[in-house]
Image (cartoon, rainbow, N blue to C red):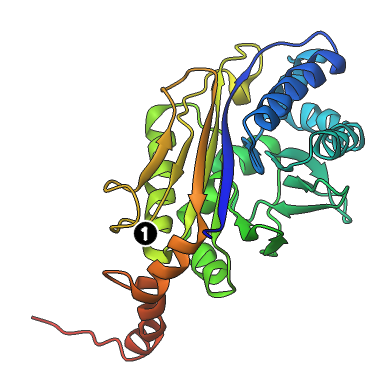
Amino acid sequence: MSERLRVGALQYFIRPVTGFEQFADQVEGLVATAADYGVHLLVFPEYFTLQLLTLGNTRRPLPEQALDLANQVPRFQQLMQELAVRYGLHIVAGSIPSVGENGALHNDCFIFGPDGRTSWQGKLHMTRWEREEWGIQPRRRLRIFSAPFGRFAVSICYDAEFPELARAAARRGADILVVPSCTDDRQGFLRVRYCAQARAIENQMFVVHACTVGSLPMVPAVSLNYGQASVLTPSDFAFARDGIRAEGAVNQEMMVVAELDLDDLRRSRESGTVLPLRDSATTSEVLADLEEISI
């Protein structure tokens, strides 16, 4: 019997909220819907938590607002942990600014299992906006997560544009790359989307890409959003010809749900039309003997 996994990728509509409870109600409604659809792994987008900034003074300097949001991390973690347990699914909870051991601000993605276990993956590469306007600093460790359905890694938005990360995860047995993103325009979205699709093809892995949509004009970081969630696959006979298992309607509030066959993925890595993950082992040898020629 094939080993199947049902995943959900959110196009999360960010809107002003009047209290944490309103935010929690929106989140729980989506988790409950995912559970009704039989989803095993639900992915929220990067920075979907920024709608909580509408609870405070949005005219203050951005670093101060980010610190306010970081103060919500314990409450946010409690909410997501309770929902994962109550509805019996794994949740990759987008991201939220958090304070590290050294007092620096980071952009962290928290992960919750149905048995109450939690973990996290920090963003490893900062965009100019995050670094220059927010003062957010990168984390320095890539993690591989083992779940009953398989192994996965998380590349937060801009991290998907660095192929070394996904390749390292695939070599350590990751079958799925989760990409929570937050982009304000089409060109920014397409950078992440095209790179996510490249990661699926070159590593023969599934990619689950979740996006923010909607707008918060009073919050500069997310005044506009452009997104289209998707579930991406390798390009071979066992998968969709275009490598797109499912995708949403651009900029609409919705959930993209797809069923993935992990056995198909593993067969592709062993006997696919091409074997880019296996054949990448020779790349380091080629690069070690790189030759420069004047002509």
Would you say 111 lies left or right of 178 here?
right
Can residue 60 be seen in this snapshot?
no
* Vertical relation: 112 (above or below) 285: above
Q: Where is residue 209 in the image (x, y as percent from the top left)?
A: 52, 41
Instruction: Please tell me how crowded label 1 is: few (under 14), some (14-19), or many (20+) other residues with Cα within 10 Å.
Output: many
Q: Name the residue under label 1.
A: 201
Q: Which residue lies furthest to the left in this view?
A: 295
* Vertical relation: 175 (above or below) 17: below
Could you tell me which quadrant the C terminus lies in?
bottom left
* Vertical relation: 122 (above or below) 54: below
Q: Residue at x 73, y 20 (%)?
A: 29
Would you say 218 lies left or right of 209 here?
right
Q: Position of residue 90 (x, y in %)?
A: 73, 45
Q: Nearer the viewer, residue 202 or 137?
A: 202
Q: Position of residue 184 (x, y in %)?
A: 49, 27
Q: Which of 233 and 161 is in front in this view?
A: 233
Q: Which residue is drawn at 55% across and 52% down?
A: 4
Q: Is mark 1 on a helix, strand or loop?
A: helix
Q: How many labels does the image show?
A: 1
Can residue 232 be seen in this snapshot?
yes
Q: Residue furthest top?
A: 18
Q: Residue at x 71, y 50 (%)?
A: 137
* Vertical relation: 182 (above or below) 173: above
Q: Nearer the viewer, residue 276 or 285?
A: 276
Instruction: Give the image quarter of residue 215.
Output: top right
Give the residue type that dot 1 points to: Ile
Would you say 9 lies left or right of 232 here?
right
Q: Position of residue 150 (x, y in %)?
A: 63, 61
